[in-house]
Image (cartoon, coloured by chain):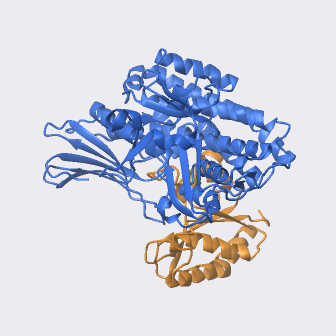
Chain colours: A blue, B orange
Amino acid sequence: MVSQDKKTILISPVTRIEGHAKITIQLDDAGEVSEALFHVNEFRGFEKFCEGRMYTEMPIITPRICGICPISHSIASVKACEMIQGIQPAYTGDLLRRLIHIGQNISSHALSFFHLSSPDFLLGFDSDPALRNIVGLAEKYPDIALRGIRLRKFGQEISERITGKKIHIAGIAPGGMAFPLTEENRKALLAWIPEALETVKMGISIIKKFQEENFGMVNSFASSPTLYLGTVGPEGQHELYDGKLRFMNADGIILQDQLEPKRYLEFIAERSVSWSYLKYPYYKPLGFDKGFYRVGPLARLNVSTRMKTPLAQKEFVNFKSMGGGKPVHGTFFYHYARLIETLSSVEEAEVILNDREITSANIQTHGRWNYNEGVGSSEAPRGTLFHHYVTDVTGKLTHVNLLIATGQNNPSMNRSITEVAKQYVRGDQIKEGMLNRVESAIRCYDPCLSCSTHAIGKMPLKLEIYNDRGELVKQHAEN
Amino acid sequence: MLKTDLTILVVGIGNNCRGDDGLGWRFVETVEALGLAFVGCEYRYQLQVEDAELISAFDLVVFADASYETLDKGFEVRACTGNATFEFSTHAQSPEAILKLCNTIFKKSPKAYIVAIGGDSWELTTSLSIKAEKNLNAAVGFFTGQFLPVQHARVCVD
């Protein structure tokens, strides 16, 4: 986006995130940052082209929205289908879905921390951008790179050993699962737990060391307060798979609690913006201007009362202490929160794998269309996800609403990059490291903007700076 | 040293629901249908860092993908060497970067080639364009008729 009467810095695409986006930074006449905008330039159209399809196709169609968090879509989708059918899943099938969901959380969070973000922490925000990635990390810290790769692999192997595939799996179905877990696969997955725990603990020590050594930067990095949304268990405990909604304000006061996800439209509204295909959701009771809320690991830990597992609980207590009794607002702490969730997920995976019913063949109940509306929700790695289906009497979809996790962070992502840009970018001396810090604000949220087509030789990276006459004056990086 | 068990991995890259972007997968499907014992086949939307471990187990790796470029014979086979190339997104790695990772982390350096097959249309469809089909046939013909026999023979006398 180029303004005719202001200077504009364009970062396109944003690097080391899932999907494609660009950032524009507007400079005023004095060369200071006036505004930064996060543009999502993908349009997929799932809500529209699914109209007319049978609701039972959605657990297969909607995971194709994303290759990083497809299971969250599967889970939300089958729950919506189960509401339409009026059934509950079989115990073991539900447990297997929970396990697969945990596996996705582990692999997605491992990708985010070790592959996308740790190069900044370990190699430096101002290091050579050509090496500030997993390849550069592997050269300098091969053990860390390998451990990160293997942690991600463990998460994917959970899906593979149950369903035969790592991504876009089949088998998560209304009523439970289509495939059981064999005893051989159960033992193989259990064997991973010790290594996975050690890797997550290593990640936690990396981020805590960085936080301690860069205390000032970390605490001032995009730290404006917001509301928070996450799902929790019946006692307010951290819950990713099957919780109820909890909204919390910036002072830590619970605004809404134990809400059924099907009531989401009573509390969440969306507004379109001109510069992005991603809308601006907000907490309806407080209106657009005061209703920005965040989702994802930081939000989930802020709204939760406790974790379910012991090692994660210990880190959770430390996390909460950083807020001094109030929510932790610093955007940078998404990374720490993400690792605490990963630790919890590995611990919970071990508990589930030791459940006496986990290899049972009782994996699915069956139903048929009974109601014309269903809403399903799950906590995707990036935040709360909603699938809302309305059908006719034959089961054909007449309306689909998908409220994606990353979309709910959109207002806050825009605000965060503006804050970081104002803090680090100086129009008269634009350095790559400054712009990397702006991008890293986005990376804290680990947004998932979905994947798109590619072919050999077609992934350009451009950073262009225009003067106030719209003339290109500088190209900062190009691939 | 005489070596009789060359292992080859063929990786098809692309999205088979976006027209000619499915060329990589179609190439692998065709090779897989031949049922060659020493050829492993994998399908990927995009290469990811964990593929470095996958390829470390093979002597020779072939990456097949669609190309936007106009290629003389409709396809091109070129050697691929490990290089820390800068990709804008870590969740989509280049073959060169995967090879570099394989060497750095797993201390393995399989021989590698890229088979680039010319595509023409990239819309939402599971079918290939006529031009892409022609290019695919040419690429597969070369691969099975000339490339594979040479590679297999070469290793046997190394």
Is residue A138 shown to the viewer in this render?
no
Indicate left or right for B9 with A19 as reference: right
* A378 sits to left or right of A367: left
Q: Which of A402 and A10 is in front in this view?
A: A402
Q: Answer whether residue A88 is visible to the viewer in this image.
A: yes
- Residue B12 percent across, percent down from the top left: 61, 66
Position above or below: A112 against A272 = above
Identify which residue, B61 or A299, lies in the foreground.
Answer: A299
Percent of width and height locating residue A156: 67, 48
Q: Which residue is drawn at 21% across and 39% down?
A: A427
Q: In which quarter of the image is residue A341?
A: top right
Q: Nearer the viewer, residue A67 or A114?
A: A67
Q: Quadrant of residue A65?
A: bottom right
Residue B112 in the image: above or below residue B87 = below
User: Who's the residue at 46% across and 23% down the image?
Assistant: A328
Screen quadrant of the C terminus of chain A: bottom left
Q: Residue at x 61, y 70 (%)?
A: B25
x%, y% of residue B50?
A: 62, 50
